[in-house]
Amino acid sequence: MELLALALAPGIAIMWFIYSKDRFDREPLKALVKSFFLGMLATLPAILLQLAGSYLLKWIMPASGWTYFILFAFGVVALTEELSKFAMLRLYAYPRIFFNEPFDGIIYGVMVAMGFATLENISYVMTGGIGTAFARMFLSVPAHATFGVLMGYYVGLAKFTHNAQSDFYIIRGLLLAILFHGLFDLFLFVQGDPGITKQIPGGFLIGSAILSYLVAVKLSWQAIKMHQSISKNSFISKDNPVT
């Protein structure tokens, strides 16, 4: 039970934090819960695609070296996971009437991401124990949240851009999430390759992963502040008093 609580805690904390930032038009609880469970469901297609992608990649080349790990991190892991999460966001929340301001892209993007990350986290923590729980609490789960914010920011813009720019925003958000997800995973994955770690110290690789994560955090915070500003201006324009 202690491990389960540790596995659930970071996702719950992050969802509450993001929900608290939605100050002007709170989302219905039912929609938030559905998005969370759809994020959990998104792990299924991601796993199936990753199994197929891993098999194909290992058939094409040896499972070692920078080329292999770049293709694995970006093309097999980041692409399949972010595409699966995006599909749940696009198919459920995006077309609904309660998705009525750009900030909602961030809200629902994070809810889906936390559903995905929480189920994934339970699996890792139950296998790896308390050490894994604390490492993922401060890195992997929040990293998924930043990917959700970055994707959701542009999905929110796309929803209220009624021209060809809408598709551009969606693609940009998806690619940005894949980019930072792939960078974060890449520097962690290559630590398992003796040929790479012989040339590059493990501390440098971990530091690079953390650096990419911190850049994603900074961009995510900027995205939150920008969409909050849009929400506030929209709220004021409706002659609602701001307290």
Image: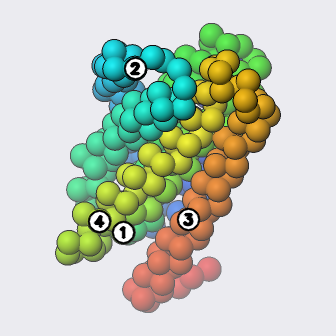
Q: How far is the residue under mark 1 from the one under mark 3? A: 12 Å
Q: Residues within 10 Å of mark 4 (few under 14, many from 20)?
A: some
Are dots 3 and 2 in contact, CB under 8 Å? no
Q: From the image, tell me which residue sits under label 1.
A: 157
Q: How far is the residue under mark 3 from the one under mark 4? A: 20 Å
Q: Residues within 10 Å of mark 1 (few under 14, many from 20)?
A: many
Residue 191, position in %: x, y? 67, 25
Q: Amino acid at mark 3?
A: Ile
Q: Earlier in the sequence, mark 1 or mark 2?
A: 2
Q: How far is the residue under mark 2 from the one under mark 4? A: 33 Å
Q: Earlier in the sequence, mark 3 or mark 2?
A: 2
Q: Nearer the viewer, mark 1 or mark 2?
A: 2
Closer to the camera in the image, 163 or 241: 163
Q: Earlier in the sequence, mark 1 or mark 3?
A: 1
Q: From the image, tell me which residue sits under label 2.
A: 61
Q: How far is the residue under mark 4 from the one under mark 1? A: 10 Å
Q: Quadrant of the C terminus?
A: bottom right
Q: How far is the residue under mark 3 from the one under mark 2? A: 41 Å
- SS for callout 2: loop
Q: Which mark is residue 119?
A: none
Residue occupying the far top of the picture: 127
Q: Is residue 48 left or right of residue 36?
A: left
Q: Amino acid at mark 4?
A: Phe
Q: From the image, tell me which residue sits under label 4.
A: 168
